[in-house]
Image: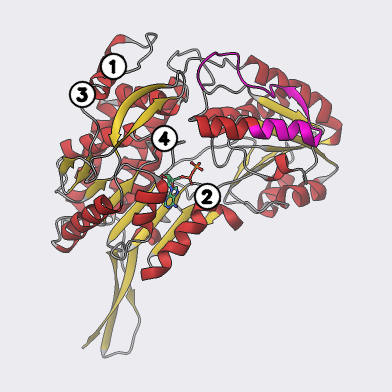
Amino acid sequence: MAAAVPSVEPATEAAAARRFLQGPPKQLLIGGKWVPAKSGKTFETINPANEEVLALVAEGDRADIDEAVAAARRAFEAGRWPSLGPHQRARYLLRIADLIEQHADELAQLITLDNGKPISEATVEVGRTVDTFRYYAGWATKFYGETNPSAPDFFNYTLREPVGVCGQIIPWNGPLSTISWKVAPALAFGNTLVLKPAEQTPLPAVRMGELICEAGLPDGVVNIVTGFGPTAGAALAGHPDVDKVAFTGSTEVGKLILQASAGNLKRVSLELGGKSPNVIFADAPLETAVALSATGVFRNQGQVCCAATRMFVQESLYDEFAERIAAKAEAIRLGEPLDQTTTMGPLVSSEQYERVLGYLKLARDEGAQAKAGGERGPQERGYFVKPTIYTAVRNDMRIAREEIFGPVAVLIPFKDENDAVLQGNDTTYGLGAGVWTRDLSRAHRVARALRAGSVWVNCYGLIDPISAFGGYKQSGFGRELGPQSIDLYTQIKSVYVKL
Ligand code: ADP
């Protein structure tokens, strides 16, 4: 099958990506071997920039998940990974990081082809993935138990042990970085795992699987089952022999995952949707506030769970801010994502495209005014939507309450600090929030008052593996990244010794 790789990309990276795309359908990684789905089924993965088929991918379902979980269980119980010395585990993680780095351009190409984000953003994503593997390589040798004061004739200590077999279900918006958020800490702390990539973007995960094999990890430690959410994903979430599920995706599916976990009381961490407030006071550093608020909502075509979608602007600045950010939106170069000069690509899939267009219609029906965008892109093919800024929006409109997951921001005025916090917190979500002001005390007050797992002051959307990320309210629970991942991927055993 001819791979649909457009002709604008540099030759070498394109050649590597093309080599990967060509050939037989992509397979599942189970117990160290690449195998077809037991059903023999495959599905097509599409390039959202031109709607052409990139490759065929094995469509795993319950039977394949069963095999993969069994392989992960065998690897865990045989001690192939948890009993390995921490220095050895660290070395494997570093080796994976090195391999990602060596194949950075090819991986960036695959991300862009499968997901549609601009190649410049895909390159940043690969770099972050490398950082996250290296960061958790460091933790493999630095998670400790404790000794605790007890009666004189007893010695008590705690051991931090791996949770066991982890099911990791990831979304399509960061198809490589979300692998590192889940796989790197799970491995660092001695777990084995089954990864279920999103059906829209399986290719970066399959290529990562090849690199993980090249790094020489023992068989069965990392298993990858591509397939659909309601079949492969649900089978993993409900599997009786999976000890922990880590999920990133929609709040709706997060609730299903939680229900599915009840069967064997598996541990669950959920990183879900958002409708993040970005509060811009009249004394904000305006130039930066406009530029970074625009990036905060338009990066990755707005398909980011912590995107700055609700912009609260102080009344006296409202009109000027609206003009300026609309100008930024108009200046965005919407087009072929493999082109280095493109700053916005297509949405990931036809479903997502229809969904976002539905919200643009709803915005018109609700009486919002499009200061920029508000319509599909001019391209004949591909899922392009223009970067969109709405004014004349109230916080109780559906476009201000529901997660659109597209390049759409609403601008809502506020009177004072109290009003900004009240409106900002008036949401069922709590993932991210921004505050823009030159008043230091106010910045700290508002950062405390906003109910969100990450708050950015005079910046937006930074995520560094050194610091925890996760949600308040219906944006989920459990914190990934930072040392907090130790709690997600270990459990504590208390040992009493009679002296
Ligand atoms: P989105 O709506 O943005 O596509 P989803 O929450 O549907 O996000 O998908 C995120 C991940 O969850 C994907 O890997 C998807 O296959 C998986 N998924 C979807 N539905 C289910 C389900 N019922 N059980 C388990 N995983 C699911």
Mark 1 vs mark 2: which is more N-terminal?
1
Q: Can you give x and y, in whole percent of width and height, for residue 76 in the image? A: 19, 60
To which residue does mark 2 refer? Answer: 272
Badge 4, how many Cα within 10 Å: few under 14, some, many 20+?
many
Q: Secondary structure at mark 1?
A: loop
Vertical comparison of 266 with 391: above or below: below
For this view, does 149 lie left or right of residue 364? left
> As displayed, is residue 217 above or below residue 357?
below
Distance from the alpha carbon under mark 1 to that under mark 2: 36 Å
Residue 477 visible in rendering: no
Residue designated by label 3: 23
**Which numbered disc, 2 or 3, marks the residue closer to the eye?**
3
CA gap, disc 1 to disc 4?
19 Å
Q: Quadrant of the C terminus?
A: bottom left
Give the alpha-carbon distance from disc 2 to disc 3, as whole Å: 36 Å
- Residue 190: image location, x then y, percent: 25, 57
Label 3 beta carbon less than 8 Å to ligand 1: no
Q: Which tag is nearer the camera, tag 1 or tag 4?
A: 1
Start-end of magenta stretch: 358-382
Q: Is residue 273 magenta?
A: no
Residue 259 spot, x, y in % from top left: 47, 64
| N-terminal label among 4 and 3 | 3
Q: Is residue 216 left or right of residue 108?
A: left
